Image: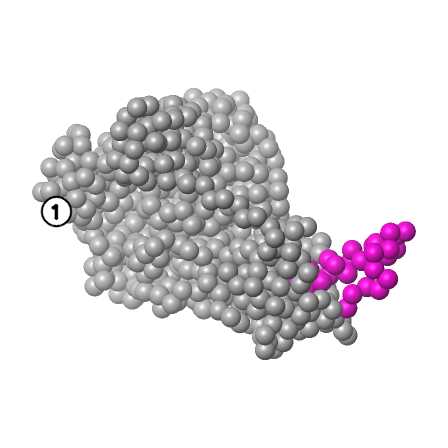
Amino acid sequence: MATCVVSRRLLDRYFPKLMLQGLTSTFPGQEKRGIYTLDPIDKNETTFNKMLIANRGEIACRIIDTSKKMGIQTVAVYSIADRQSKHVSKADEAVFIGPAAASESYLNMDKIVEAVKSTGAEAVHPGYGFLSENAQFVQKLEEEGVFFVGPSIGSLTGMGDKLESKRLAAKAGVNTIPGYDGVIKDADHCVQISREIGYPVMIKASAGGGGKGMRIARNDEDARAGFKLSTQEAMSSFGDSRMLVEKFIDNPRHIEIQVLGDKHGNVVYLNERECSIQRRNQKVVEEAPSTFLDEKTRKAMGEQAVRLCKELGYYSAGTVEFLVDESRNFYFLEMNTRLQVEHPITECITGVDLVQQMLRVAKGHKLNIKQEDVKINGWAIENRVYAEDPYKNFGLPSVGRLYSYKEPTHLPGVRCDSGIEEGSEISIYYDPMICKLVCYGKDRNEAISRSIAALDQYIIRGVTHNIPLLRDILTEKRFNEGNISTNYLNEVYGEGFQGRKLNDSDKYKMIAVSVGIFAKWDTRNSQFLNSTKIRIHEKVRDSWDLFVKFDGEDIPVKVSQTNGLYKVEIGDEIIEINKDDINLSESLILTKIGNDEVVAMQLASRNAHGEYQMIFQGTKHNMRILTVPAFDYLKWMKQKPKIDVSKQLIAPMPGIVKSVSCKIGDKVMEGQELCVVEAMKMQNSMSCGSSGTVKIMNIEEGQTVGENDLLIELE
């Protein structure tokens, strides 16, 4: 696992200060015992000799880590796109299973089974997604005498179909959401049923999960479009296009109960996770426990989840998901019969290694954990760090190679579950997740503080990522009050995420550090030139008169250096920075400004034209730093002409064209769908921003497009 490289000098200087801020404390004895304190690994207990992980990325790496601690040999599988991936190098063996497309590799049951047979693996852990909830896959494994690290075929079948799961939940006495008890035949049927239930409704894939194949409809037009896109998405992701419709509960919370059962009828619940902050029905920030539940509601939800498991004869790890309204009434949403993406936050507050427990149960061991053993110790928050542009609909996918990647695991209380490393490539074929950043502390405030510090010191270069949005959420008033729902993003960022706005104090801090970098570069260059035969300066500068162009302002700044400090004058403000805090070879800058807290900034880029891109408080800020003479010359420079793009349809992200709804010569209206582009398993309807006639058509169905490609042009 890559760690954030910060100079030892800076860590030695500022970690004592970070400790004073509550960023380095741990639970008593945790530095010796680690997270997993409840039912730790027993090396004398029987287990599997060799196991294949039928997955990729961070979850494959996570499973490999626990398997190795238990003494289990691991086998990875990989597609051509993953041939150099982290999970491949971590496993004891690796088997190539085909092309990049998941349907031809990770979803190809025959290839996975052949890999199991060729390596002699006794068991298969499916992780999440792909084949993790596929009963047919489990049947194939059982026919080969191979253990499946997950629940029974009956449980997968019962809970894998949303219609059947709702019937079973009702039979078990679990609260359910009103809806249509059948499969939707077509778009007209979808509209009819939606009207009968009453808008708003949720259209979702019967075999779905993970936010795929789901749309909210508030009128007939939404219902028709939602049915079409969700059907296509469901077929692409699950190979099953069946749809259902149910009442959509406005302003709910999404709270789920982690369950764990064995093959002997024992079931416990491991408390809840709050997963309400979502975009496109996919979770962004999760925490455990929830700020909203009281002990009475937690117990009622947990007991209903256990009752459902006992009705099913469920064993292994699983999650029962609920929607909870403002009065703490809760309704069964679905059950995920697998390990959840966000399982680490439950592990942090309960001390249970869920992967270890899944392996024990699959081997036939009884649970050693009783319900009374399960406590809530501290607080944990998971930020899903995605390769996405948060400024585009809260996160359209980004692809590329990570030319610089450093995880902030030097900070205590920080756990990074990732399947990538420096040099890894984020492709269009799979989920855009970079890392699950998990931060835990003695209470919610400490977990939030640690999360903010970790996000500020997370270095990711090569792709656009969603850290600006994550960081802003953690400092937002409603989030800090615990006042959240599944509508949170749309309500708080009604115009879309615009980035963090700096107050004057923070703006001056960032400018001060930036001009300090400028001064250090200028000093270094002068010293180098004066050491050669090219003597530009007879004397190295000790002061600079500058203009900083930032956020539409031209800000005069004076910098002087003395006694190991840069003294920066911005208007009436004087800010002093220790010169040694600025190391030109490091992207991360930790410095203490005045008597304030230690602040973290990142230099993302700079060039010879004085253009600087700084990352501060999670957001990129562009500025230009010029000497006074250079600033005076600017008035003679021509401005670049602005290009009218109102008649152009530009790809906002890379992807594959799934359908095209127009041709050259067609007259189209503003807002009309022109094509659908699939990116990382999500269907994105692309519409025109103005009316006109199609003049240029650069795409066809099945074509791969890149970000900012011109797709269609009107006249």
| Res. 113 in view | no
The residue that appears at 44% across and 38% down in the rendered structure is 653
Query: Which residue matches tag 1?
Result: 198
Q: Main secondary structure of the magenta part?
A: helix
The residue that appears at 44% across and 65% down in the rendered structure is 475
User: x%, y% of residue 349?
Assistant: 44, 60
Q: Is residue 444 left or right of residue 549?
A: left
Q: Is residue 199 left or right of residue 377?
A: left
The residue that appears at 28% across and 36% down in the rendered structure is 691
Q: For residue 205, which quarter of the picture?
A: top left
Q: For residue 546, which quarter of the picture?
A: bottom right
Amino acid type of the residue that numbered disc 1 sits on in the rendered structure:
Gly
User: x%, y% of residue 418?
Assistant: 53, 45
Residue with the most extreme left position: 196
Q: Nearer the viewer, residue 615 or 246?
A: 615
User: x%, y% of residue 550?
Assistant: 54, 61
Residue with the most extreme right position: 533
The residue that appears at 54% across and 48% down in the rendered structure is 639
Helix or strand or loop: what does disc 1 sit on?
A: loop
**Magenta stretch containing residue 600, yes or no?**
no
Placement of the C terminus among the 4 image quadrants: top left
Q: From which residue to which does the magenta span run?
A: 513-542
Q: Is residue 142 above or below residue 341?
A: above
Q: Residues within 10 Å of mark 1 (few under 14, many from 20)?
A: some
Q: Is residue 337 above or below residue 564?
A: above
Q: Nearer the viewer, residue 251 or 715?
A: 715
| Res. 636 in view | yes
Residue with the most extreme front position: 636
**Magenta stretch containing residue 538, yes or no?**
yes
